[in-house]
Image (cartoon, coloured by chain):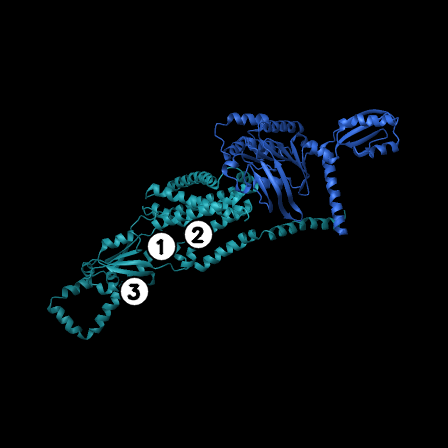
Chain colours: A blue, B cyan
Amino acid sequence: MSTEATVSASGLTKSFGNDAGVFDIDLEVAAGQIVGLIGPSGSGKTTTVRLMTGLLTPDSGSIRVLGQDPLEFTTSTRARIGYMAQDSVFFPDLTLRENLDFAASVFGVPYRRKKRIEAMVEILDLGEVMDRMLGDASGGEKRRLSLAATLFHDPDLVFLDEPTAGVDPILRRRLWDHFERLSGSGRTLIVTTQYVGEAAYCDFVGVLASGRVIAFDTPEGLRRRAFAGELLDVVFATPPHHEDVTSLSATTEVHNLIWLDDHTIRVSVDDAGSFGPTVVEWARERNAEIEKTEPYLPPFDDVFVELVATLDQERDRESTVADAG
Amino acid sequence: MPAEERYTAALIRSLAFVRKELITVWRQPRLMATLVLGPFLILFLFGLGYRETPEPFRTLIVTQDEDSFSAEIADLGEALGAGIELVERTDDAESARRRLANREVDLVVIAPDDALETLGRGEHATFTVLHSEIDPVLTSSVKLLARLGVEEFNRQVLTGLIETAQSESEQADELVAGIEETGGSDALERVQTTDPSLLVSPFAVETDALVEPPSTQAAFYAPGVLVLLVQHLALTFAALSLVRERELGITEIYRISPLTVRETLAGKYLSFLILGLFLAAALSATMLLLGVEIQGPLWSFTVIVALVILASLGLGFALSGLARSDSQAVQYSMVVLLVSIFFTGFVLPLDQLTAPVRWVSYLVPGTYGIGGLHDVIFRGQQARPELMGGLLLYAAVMAVLAWLALRRDVQPARSRKLS
């Protein structure tokens, strides 16, 4: 497998006016990774994917996908790419099976494909509806058909624009399991989603807001970045003195401290594991009794909110400086 | 609720549609152009180009130099009036027929071999007017023209004779004496016993067609109906197919897939060609049931129909590049149908359009198709080379335009890359 990044973007910008678009996107995606692009509606996820697939022409910046400029993709390169659009894009007058067959043909899959169809049907739980007209299918069934059509030709690089939208949680989990299997077999997946929790399935996550990648890291790295380290909940047997706790927050190891209730504080530290004994020792010196310490893994919704809040604060600071200037 | 408020609310609800519909139409200038300006322009062009008098028939006159009426026949062109354009006088009837068959001329007028002798036998001397028209309107025109022409010819001959007689009246006594001396009383007797109608109209005319004309008017229009239906179906399907895929968004998948414009075009052309041929076969069968026989080669008929379908598909694909929605595509195809009805020779002969406007006819595949099928079905010939060549060229040009229209939907983005 090539060591060259499967996708590499630098300063990628596409503006639609009125601050809409994506700006200065920098991304590096290695082969075999699952990269999630997460952000609210209108944050630029789809535009980023469309730039990566060559559906849009960037205003500035550069991008290489599978070693080529997406605007110059050769036929053989395009055969290695799968793309699932945000909306269902197949023919309502054909059955799901006929649509899948058509998509397979468009990608040049040989006609002896019955087994593969059955396999896809199994994975995507489409068994009973394959002979139904697409126009009569539910939103979730249409999404699953799109996904089947995207993956049918076994592409090396897969762009999935909100593949789990409208899909129930059980099937969503199965899909992510399948994505992980694909990744395990060397496929690269770039997945956009509004479900922030799905970041946990990704190797890397790009968090987008207002057309900018405000963070690009591993899921764990994002948590650390959002909360300035790892989080540790410290539960006291009796409510501690506020002065004592203030002295704890003044130590260099603690980046942030918040009260959860009278007995409990949450501290942000570099390494929650090594900080546990430290805080126990600190309590003993102050005759405070700690009932327990436990690392806290914040949900990605909180991570996302925190990152966006941080971005907003930075912007406010920048605009204040600019106004003062 | 008080009645006044109820009426106000009802008015507001109705006005909501008025506002919405007007804004919607206002924001679709292409719709307005297609629905209003399109038909208006077509009718305006038709009115501008239509002329009531068809082009004069290019005519050959076949006569023998030693004919007794050669002087009068020399003026036959004038007798036939503005309806004909005298191309040549010849004594070679076979060559004239050949030229008529090759459509170098429209009419061949064959003068009676020895008119005086025929008249002497108490029979009409008959002109034969040969034509190769299949259009019932033109066939009637030829018959009328021939009848009027021979009547005029008779008038001219009789006027000439009477003028001669009058100028020589002072010598009448001598003439009578001479007749008696030479035993001419027999001739005089013959004149006295001759049918008066022969004396008034010594010359008659009969028209004959080189090709068997359609048995009925409906039969004549049948190939035109076939061509226009096939053209309309192919054009509409092609335009709708691309617009619909664009609306569905599937063209994005095409652009990312390894699919090429060539492959897409080939697939679409082939599928709609099959459909079009099925329709054409069904219409042809109906035509046969109506008694319209294909007198020319079947392969030529098939090639013309196939080319009409291909050309119409190309036009449809090209138009889809201009249409933004299903309904717009349908409107465009209806405009083409309207143009076809007026300009393809379906209703009126192309000759009745003035030259610059007639060029509009050649922007529609049906013009070539109808002309070609008339040649094959009624004349029993292959389609004229200029029609086949024109149709082939048209289909090729449309294929290029279709390729350009499709490239936007299917082509990889490199062609759209900013420099």
The residue closer to the viewer here, B413 or B1, is B413
The residue closer to the viewer here, B345 or A7, is A7
Tag of residue A131: none
Question: What residue did someone put label 2 on?
Answer: B363
Amino acid type shown at disc 2: Leu
**Can you tell which quarter of the image residue A241 is in?**
top right
Residue in view at x 88 percent, y 33 percent: A243
Which quadrant of the figure contains the N terminus of chain A?
A: top right
Give the Cα distance between marks 2 and 1: 24 Å
Q: Chain of mark 2?
A: B
Residue B334: % across, % down: 50, 48
Structural crowding at the residue carrying mark 1, measured as other residues with C-alpha within 10 Å and reported as few (<14), some (14–19) or many (≥20): some
Question: What residue did someone put label 3 on?
Answer: B78
Amino acid type shown at disc 3: Glu
Structural crowding at the residue carrying mark 3, measured as other residues with C-alpha within 10 Å and reported as few (<14), some (14–19) or many (≥20): some
Q: Earlier in the sequence, mark 1 or mark 3?
A: 3
Question: What residue did someone put label 1 on?
Answer: B138
Give the Cα distance between marks 3 and 2: 37 Å
Dot 3: element = helix
Residue B305: % across, % down: 40, 43
Do tag 2 and tag 1 residues touch (Cβ < 8 Å)? no
